[in-house]
Image (cartoon, helix red, strand yellow):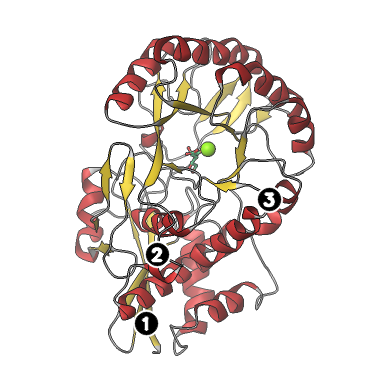
Amino acid sequence: MKITDIQVFVTSPGRNFVTVKVTTESGVYGLGDATVNGRELAVVTYLEEHVVPCLVGRDAHNIEDIWQYLYKGVYWRRGPITMAAIAAIDMALWDIKGKVAGLPVYQLLGGKCREAITLYAHANGENIEDTLDKTEELIQQGFKAIRLQSAIPGLSETYGVLGDKKDYFELQGNRPLPPEQEWSTAKYFKLVPELFEQARQRFGDKAQFLHDVHSRLTPIESAKLGKMLEEYQLLFLEDASIAENQDNYKLIRHHTTTPLALGETYNTIWDCKDLIQNQLIDYIRVAATHAGGITGVKKISDFADIYNVRTAPHGAPDLSPICFAAHMHLNISTHNFGIQEFVGFGNEESKTIFKHDMKLENGMIYVSDAPGLGVEFDEQAATQYPYKRSYLPVSRLEDGTLWHW
Ligand code: GCO
Ligand code: MG
């Protein structure tokens, strides 16, 4: 079944999404997500200039061979742009295979390991009370796990909570150049233990709690935070520190039993091999869009399984519903799945473009049984929201030193 055409669409219903459509000679087509937040057009060029010409005429059924062709077959391997391009093609090919077979993709991956997917939702507040009020709403809606983030007194903007009272869902607003945010580890350390102390006092064990440090700490600071939070029994502490040097996590692990998660920016097994095989983390958070698609994530999760590391896929709003659907098929069929990050199904504009029938009930998602990935893309509706240049923020210490965002 030959590939006859590959189109790349960029649409911006509140934020940019890059969508790939692979069409075959039989007329069956598949969809993939290639969005890299703030670097969208780099992936578009990579696809249009370097990938599409090599794939037209190839057999759409040969998913693994095409994955290897795009990964091993190029001299300049890895990195987010390359791996997002591979990812989108890979998702589209799985979508096609499912449609041809008349089966949802999870059936092709081995079938169900569980009935539904447990989610963690976000409570982002202007202060501790605000965060906890939002937590209460989420518990009432049935969420079993909640990530708590709160603005830090004395800092103008904080990851997860922006100063203009908009949370991070709207990061892509009118920001034609990267905004700058302040960071102070000392101020952060005053807030975070207090946030979890009050959360446990107010909610007891009604929910599991998580927190994203967003890589702001040095390894020894992360170790200290992990220790301070042990008594609050987090499900996991995310991105406690940058792990470009994977040895950083040896130090953190040595000091704390707080479970650790990371990997949302990772693109291949090589970014997390040492972390996994030395059992320095508990959850690997790679996303299908940024780690080579369903094929790429499956390779990483199977490797992680033998080291007791579970998956907790990235679920931020910059991943399109096509990626989210791909995660659902992976999550339901992966034995060592842990938990899925969830920030809702997107805004109303986005829902006119991406349509699916995934069901949210009591903090869990029931996967679609539609053939393929189960997402439709309305090309006409997409044209109403043209691309807008947009950046993620950068971070500086209070004295102006550039820091990790
Ligand atoms: C998360 C992430 C996001 C990222 C965003 C960057 O845990 O959901 O940290 O908030 O910052 O996806 O593009
Ligand atoms: Mg994160």
Q: Is mark 2 within 8 Å of ligand 1?
A: no
Q: Is residue 247 left or right of residue 92?
A: right
Say whether residue 44 is visible. yes
- Classify 10 Å Cα crowding around label 2: few (below 14), some (14-19), many (20 and above): many
Residue 333, how many percent across, how many down? 45, 59
Q: Which residue is mark 1?
A: 5
Look at 57% across and 47% down and name the residue there: 310
Q: Nearer the viewer, residue 355 or 168?
A: 355
Asked if disc 2 and disc 3 are in contact, CB closer than 8 Å, the reply is no
In the displayed structure, 162 sits above or below 154; it is below
Say whether residue 184 is visible. no
Mark on residue 106? Answer: 2
Q: Amino acid at mark 3?
A: Tyr
Which comes sooner in the sequence, label 2 or label 3?
2
In the displayed structure, 210 sits above or below 12; it is above
Q: Nearer the viewer, residue 19 or 163?
A: 19
Mark on residue 307? Answer: 3
In the displayed structure, 340 sits above or below 158; it is below
Residue 168, how many percent across, how many down? 41, 32
